């Protein structure tokens, strides 16, 4: 989904953690950099040869063609301030991609599963978004939202495990039950009722 967008571009990933996304896409981008506030993670990434900044304030201004945040935006204490800071790093017409947990997740909205709530509503998840809230934050920061949609990271088997066992990890424990065509249909169904577990937004700096 992202490879063609970062292809031969100057790309910055914010909140990159252990750097898995950098490992996957570094050969596609013309240049890749990261922001990672965790000292241990940042030092490990630097040893691997990545250019890593402690905060977005230290990254280059008006420089990047693509900026990505994968499951980072929901951790930000001051999201509008952070978006404005991120915008200052981007060239005109550059792309911003944000992926976040969906507040209308099927396990939350329809099943209202207590155990899943305890698992999902942890202290570092400061806000869970729906399409409208995510779009509003971006518009307030003067980004143009090009596309916003739901995807399903976890399978039907994972959901069945939550329902029956009240625990995560069903996609691992019951991996033998997984069927690709069934997972695709389940994702399509959840998209139709707007209850996927994840939202992705593609936006543009005006």
Image (cartoon, helix red, strand yellow):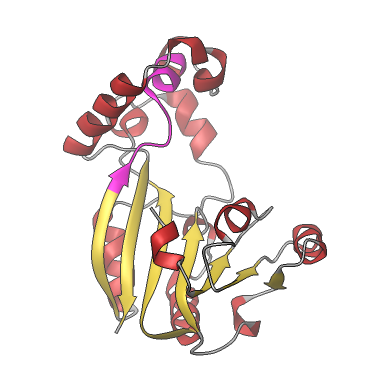
Residue 109 percent coordinates (x, y): 29, 33
Q: Is residue 159 magenta?
A: yes
Q: Is residue 163 magenta?
A: no
Count of number-bearing discs:
0
| Left/right of residue 48 with respect to residue 151 in the rendered view | right
Q: Residue, x 48% and y 72% (percent of image)?
A: 8
Q: Quadrant of residue 22?
A: bottom right
Is any atom of residue 167 visible in this view? no
Is any atom of residue 100 visible in this view? yes
- Name the foreground residue: 192 vs 91: 91
Q: Residue, x 30% and y 81% (percent of image)?
A: 142
- Name the foreground residue: 133 vs 144: 144
| Left/right of residue 128 with respect to residue 104 in the rendered view | right
Residue 108 percent coordinates (x, y): 35, 32
Residue 188 percent coordinates (x, y): 22, 33
Location of the C terminus (image quadrant): bottom left
Taking 101 as reference, is 27 above or below it? below
Taking 3 as reference, is 158 above or below it? above
Residue 39 percent coordinates (x, y): 79, 63
Segment colored magenta: 150-161
- Name the foreground residue: 48 vs 96: 48
Q: Quadrant of residue 156?
A: top left
Q: Residue, x 37% and y 73% (percent of image)?
A: 95
Q: Residue, x 33% and y 24% (percent of image)?
A: 183
Taking 110 as reference, is 9 above or below it? below
- The residue at the far left in this view is 192
């Amino acid at each position: 989904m992202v490879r063609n967008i970062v292809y031969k571009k100057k790309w910055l990933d914010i909140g990159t953690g252990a750097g898995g996304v950098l490992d996957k896409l570094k050969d596609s981008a013309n240049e890749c950099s990261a922001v990672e506030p965790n000292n241990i993670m940042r030092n490990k990434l630097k040893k691997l040869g990545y250019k890593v900044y402690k905060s977005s304030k230290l990254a280059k201004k008006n420089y990047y063609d693509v900026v990505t945040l994968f499951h980072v935006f929901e951790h930000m204490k001051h999201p509008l301030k952070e978006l404005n800071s991120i915008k200052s790093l981007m060239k005109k017409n550059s792309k911003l991609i944000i992926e976040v947990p969906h507040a209308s997740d099927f396990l939350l909205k329809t099943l209202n599963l207590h155990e899943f709530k305890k698992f999902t509503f942890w202290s570092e998840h400061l806000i869970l978004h729906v399409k409208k809230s995510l779009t509003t934050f971006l518009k307030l920061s003067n980004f143009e939202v090009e596309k916003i949609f739901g995807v399903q990271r976890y399978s039907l088997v994972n959901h069945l495990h939550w329902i029956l066992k009240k625990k995560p990890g069903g996609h691992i424990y019951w991996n033998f039950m997984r069927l690709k065509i069934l997972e695709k249909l389940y994702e399509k169904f959840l998209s139709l009722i707007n209850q996927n577990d994840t939202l992705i937004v593609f936006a543009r700096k005006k």
